[in-house]
Structure formats: C-alpha cells, structure tokens
Image (cartoon, helix red, strand yellow):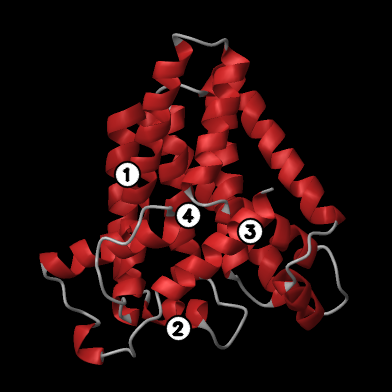
Amino acid sequence: MLRPLAESFRTWRLSKKLVWPVRKSHCWRLDNKAYVISFFAALHFLTIVPPVVQRTFRMDELGRSVASYPLVGLLIGALLLGLSWLLSNIFPPWIVAGLVLVVWVLASGGIHMDGVMDAADGLFGGRTADQRLTIMHDERVGAFGVLAAVFVLFLKLAALAEGASGFPSLLLAPVVGRWTMSMAIVAFPYARKEGLGSAMKNEARGMYLWVSTLFCVVIAYLSAGVPGLMAMGPAAFLLVLVGRFVVGRVGGFTGDIYGATNELVELFVLLSFSVSI
C-alpha cells in the first residue's frame, strides 16, 4: 500500500517543484524573506502540505531549505504529540501507537518509508555500484525492502506502545531525524552526478547546516534538557556509520538513502527514550 501512495506523491511533488536555474547572486542572500521561502520549500518537499509559495523554487532556495529541516520535524512532532494525547484518553496504548504511526508515515506521503525499501533493495543487492543504483531506482520492491520496512515499522510501533508515544520523545524524534538529513546532504557526496538531488546538494552550504544544528540544539534542549542534547551525538554517529557504508556501496547518498537515514534516526531516538534505566 505504501509504494503506490509514495510513487503518486513523488510524481505530484516533482511536477509541482520543477526548479529555475541557479542564480549565483542569490546563493548567499540572508534576508528573512529568503529563509521564509526556503522553509516553505522544506515543508513542501518533506510533507504532504500543499504548496504555500505559488511558484517554482530556485535551486539556491532548495539548498537553503536544509536549514529548516528541524523546524519541519518540529511541526510533525507537535502533530503526533497532540494526536497521541488525544487518542490516549480513548484507546489503549497499542491502538494509540498504531494510529500515531499511521499518521507519522502519511505526514510525509510515505516517501521516507519508500526510501527505506528502495535503499535496502539497492544497498544489499547487485554486484557493482551502478547495479545497486539501478535496483534502487526500480519501482518494484524486493525481499530486502519488504523486510527493512517491516523491521522499522514494527520497532517503531513497539517503542511507541511501550512508552515513547509521549513527550519529549515523540516531539524530538522527527526533529533529530531531519537534522541528520540536512547533515547528510551537506557533509556527504551524492551518488549520482545529475538530477534534482545532485543540483540541490551543490547549493546546500555548510552555513545552512550550522543553522539547522542550532535549531535542533534549541529544540532538543527546550523539550528534553540534557537528555535531548545527548540524543544528538549518537544520532550523528549513526549517520557517520551509515554514510561510510553507503559511500562504500554506491559512492554516496541518494534521495532514498536520505529518507532511510531519517527513519533509522527516528527509530533510534524512540528506542533511546524507551529504555528503562
């Protein structure tokens, strides 16, 4: 069910977001309006929210949008937290966890879970980097993809049912997950030399990662204090491990691997706050 939804959403999303050529004079513009537009670009790319800016986004705006990824995660986390609080007064924990997880997946149009399946099929199949990238681009789902999706969804469901469906874990997981996405875009190479992802990566400056990190630090500290900040370190380390693995397998990240990384980090944060000490 997820694959048709994700593919139709991806087609609609790309049809709405064909970008203008890069204009170098805009790459380092730091006025408030530019960052607001880039926030809406991030919101549009990472969620099912309809376009707010009624025009195509420039490449520099898409590159700058990585600074706003944690803010998009904050909105998703707030939605999930409110839903969890509302449902917990009506249903038992496992039902609440299941409904929250469904909304969580649908909030992004299923593209991150689709990334988990594509990345698993590609990274663990094929004999060469080109073959793996071809498999990853294939619309069909293989055994590795199905298993990866089942594992991630089941572990998320279990973590939510056993104590991670409240504050601060449910708020923090989407924030840290999307922060690591911004880090992956800026810090690691892109596997393909052409396409929207490659052009966007070329416009994602290190300064935007610092802004993204600042947002994540503030949100993590205000929501969970020191434990929230402590979750960021292992999450970044997990990204480094994933990054070294995928660079060795296919030469860099792809859009699917960005989404899969987000899912893995979200799961890590949920499991971290589920541990009884």
Are the two marked residues, 1 and 3, in contact with CB atoms closer than 8 angstroms?
A: no
Q: CA distance from mark 1 to mark 2?
A: 28 Å
Could you tell me which residue is drawn at 43 percent across and 53 percent down? 48
Which disc number belongs to residue 217? Answer: 1
Q: Secondary structure at mark 4?
A: helix
**Disc 2 designates what residue?**
199
Amino acid identity at mark 3 = Gly
Front of the two marks 1 and 2:
2
Q: Pick whichever of labels 4 and 1 is earlier in the sequence.
A: 4
Above or below residue 252? Residue 171 is: above
Which element is circle 2 on? helix
Instruction: Give the amino acid type for the residue marked by disc 2 in the picture.
Output: Ala
Lower sequence index among marks 3 and 4: 3
Report whether residue 241 is seen.
no
236 shown above or below 157: below
**Secondary structure type for disc 1:** helix
Give the mark toward the camera: 4 or 1: 4
Q: Residues within 10 Å of mark 2 (few under 14, many from 20)?
A: some
Q: Residue 195 has which mark? A: none
Asked if the residues shown at circle 2 and circle 4 are in contact, with their CB atoms under 8 angstroms apart, the answer is no
Residue 39 visible to the viewer: yes
The residue under label 3 is 115
**Which residue was labeled with disc 4?**
180
